[in-house]
Image: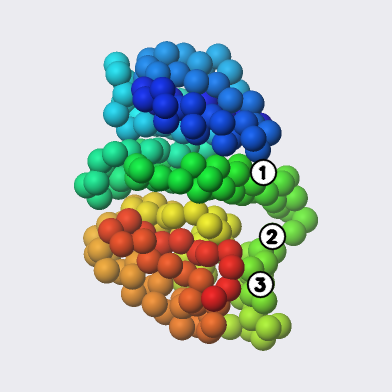
């Protein structure tokens, strides 16, 4: 697996690179946004770790270019790291296409774990896509979603979900362990109909938690950002 770390602080760059290389990643580095973008164009990376503030081209601009032109830059997973504390900066990064974020200072082991999870989910999604016509079942502990027959079963008992509840739950299960912004949920489930209001997603999450029973505790609110489905039961 190949990773590109675009970070202008050499000490942080080397630290991140060390932990990823210990996990078997082939690591490349760049200190400059424009140079990093050229490397993305010329090589096939599985994961990008982008600092938000970079010389010549910042992480947000790189992310937008990569997501807008996948035919040129591919479809790597993107984690943005930032020293900024304003939630608006995080939301903007997620909105332009970052898959996850971490605020500095952070534990590099957490960054590696998140990166590996993103790539694993990506591989699983691709595999599911290839077998889409054969089987579209998704399992989370004792919960089974069958997309073909629009069914949710918990402990082998059918639980009724509305259409939007169903697709919101499906989105969480497919992206287990990954933070999903409210904006992305609205885009995917409500098809960009933002007139529904900011609290709509929160209300639907509450309904889903209730219907999931004990598993509902696995849905975590990421304050000011969105939601994440934790892999482990509590």
Q: Would residue 162 be seen by someone viewing this image from the given angle?
A: no
Where is residue 153 shown, x and y percent of the image? 65, 79
Which mark is first along the chain, 2 or 1? 1
Residue 13 horizontal side relative to residue 90, left or right: right
Quadrant of res 55: top left
Q: Quadrant of the C terminus?
A: bottom right
Q: In the depicted view, which residue is nearer to us: 190 or 33?
A: 33
- Across and down, in percent, residue 35 comes to 42, 13
Mark in front: 2 vs 3: 3
Task: Tell me: residue 137, above or below residue 60.
Answer: below
Residue 21 visible from this viewpoint: yes
Residue at 64% across, 46% down: 120
Whole-Å distance between the Cαs marked 2 and 3?
Answer: 16 Å
Judging by the rendered image, the residue that carries numbered circle 3 is 141
Q: Earlier in the sequence, mark 2 or mark 3?
A: 2
For the point 39% across and 73% down, the residue is 204
For mark 2, does the 10 Å Cα neighbourhood hold few (<14), some (14 to 19), or many (20 or more) residues?
A: some
- Disc 1: which residue: 123
Q: Position of residue 107 (x, y in %)?
A: 46, 46
* Element type where label 3 sits in the image: loop
- Label 1–label 3 contact, CB within 8 A: no
**What percent of the width, then of the height, locates residue 149?**
66, 70
Residue at left offset 58%, top offset 18%: 43
Which residue is labeled 2 in the image? 136
């Amino acid at each position: 697996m190949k990773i590109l770390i675009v970070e202008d602080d050499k000490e942080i760059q080397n630290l991140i690179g060390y932990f990823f290389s210990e996990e078997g990643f082939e690591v490349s580095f760049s200190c400059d946004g424009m140079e990093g973008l050229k490397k993305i164009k010329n090589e096939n990376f599985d994961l990008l770790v982008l600092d938000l503030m970079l010389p010549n081209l910042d992480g947000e601009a790189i992310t937008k270019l990569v997501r807008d032109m996948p035919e040129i830059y591919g479809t790597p997973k993107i984690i943005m790291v930032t020293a900024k504390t304003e939630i608006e900066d995080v939301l903007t990064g997620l909105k332009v296409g970052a898959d996850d974020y971490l605020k500095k200072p952070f534990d590099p082991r957490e960054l590696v774990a998140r990166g590996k999870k993103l790539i694993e989910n990506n591989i699983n999604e691709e595999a599911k896509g290839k077998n889409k016509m054969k089987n579209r079942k998704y399992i989370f502990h004792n919960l089974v979603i069958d997309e073909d027959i629009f069914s949710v079963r918990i402990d082998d008992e059918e639980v009724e979900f509305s259409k939007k509840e169903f697709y919101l739950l499906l989105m969480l299960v497919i992206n287990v362990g990954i933070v999903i912004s409210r904006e992305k949920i609205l885009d995917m489930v409500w098809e960009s109909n933002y007139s529904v209001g900011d609290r709509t997603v929160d209300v639907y999450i509450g309904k889903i938690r209730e219907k999931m029973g004990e598993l509902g505790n696995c849905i975590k609110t990421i304050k000011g950002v969105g939601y994440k489905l934790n892999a482990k039961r509590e």
